Amino acid sequence: MNMVQEAVVAQGISKLYNSVVALDSVSFTVRSGEVYVFIGPNGAGKSTLFNIIAGIMKPSSGSIKVLGGNPFDPSTRLKTSYLPATPPLYPWLTVMENVDFYASLYGFNKKTIRQEAKGLLEKLGVQELATKLSSKLSTGQMKLASIVLALAVEAELLILDEPTTALDPGMRRSVLDLLREKVLNRATILMATHLVDEAEGLANRVAIIDRGKLIADGGVEELKKLYAPPAVLVIKPSLEQVEKSSTVLKLRWENVYSYDGEVRVHTDDPDEDLPKAILILAEKGIRVLSISVVKPTLEDVFLKLTGRRLKE
């Protein structure tokens, strides 16, 4: 492959739907051979951005180069593979017939693509899907078949929108292993996810997007160093006392967040703050079921930057 140094260069990309701003002057660069992951909640603008990068939708303003060319140029699109959030399978075709159809549509060698797809299905342990009608697949099977469809093509740039949604943890790991193989074979991966463990385990660099704006990007550890605290207190009170606990702790600490039955407190000094938190809650009659000190995640970075969760 004759690879360009920069796989994607976006400058000031905006997209308006009537008066609604879906993307607001987004700029970033993806280097060839890296995994660049967008994290953000639903409605943040990730899918709109990916549709523009894949040459499906035109931006309202701004410029974008993909693999050194115009994303709307057919020669550029032949070097990319796009997996949208909604599986692009035709329901009246089997999985392998879908593979054949897309190979024919883009002028790829059908035999080569079919062989690659068969190998991917075997690696995932779901070779029986090959002859199944797409309309008969479960949500998870549909996602797996779509991943196989996207990865069977020898593309320079893989654009993957929430590729592991609807997969169980074991299958998610298998898919992420396949993506690592693709990187070793010199592919560039542009991916969107709201799963922080996925981003942390795969990304060379992460872009945080919220409400159409790119608010930060960089390496995982770089972002944590810039925006996350050294440590996080994770406090689990009884369920009915979660909000009360959060309110009480906010009187002492600035960055306190409650969700999923727990309260997270960002701290610079966990040794000092852990006993303080227990004492403050006890004084208010709040029973703590457990308290622990953990390392910050990208979720904590997002909380610090936006005051909100990734999954809202």
Image (cartoon, grey):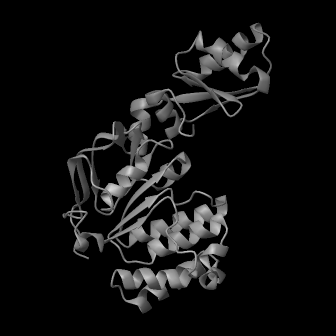
- Depth check: give the residue in front, 30 or 61: 61
Q: Is residue 230 above or below residue 135?
A: above
User: Is residue 159 found left or right of 175 in the rendered image?
Assistant: left
Identified at 21% across, 65% down, the residue is 4
Towards the viewer: 301 or 39? 39
* Residue 165 x, y percent position in the rendering: 58, 57
Residue 224: % across, % down: 44, 36
| Whether residue 100 is situated above or below residue 171 in the rendered picture | below
Apparent side of residue 108 relative to residue 84 in the rendered image (left or right)? left
Quarter holding residue 129: bottom right
Q: Position of residue 265 (x, y in %)?
A: 59, 23
The part of the image, by quadrant, that contains residue 249 is top right
| Residue 297 visible at all | no
Q: Residue at x 50, y 26 (%)?
A: 307
Q: Residue at x 48, y 87 (%)?
A: 114
The reply, left or right, for residue 6 in relation to residue 136 is left
Give the quarter of the image for residue 64: bottom left
Identify the residue at the far bottom of this view: 111
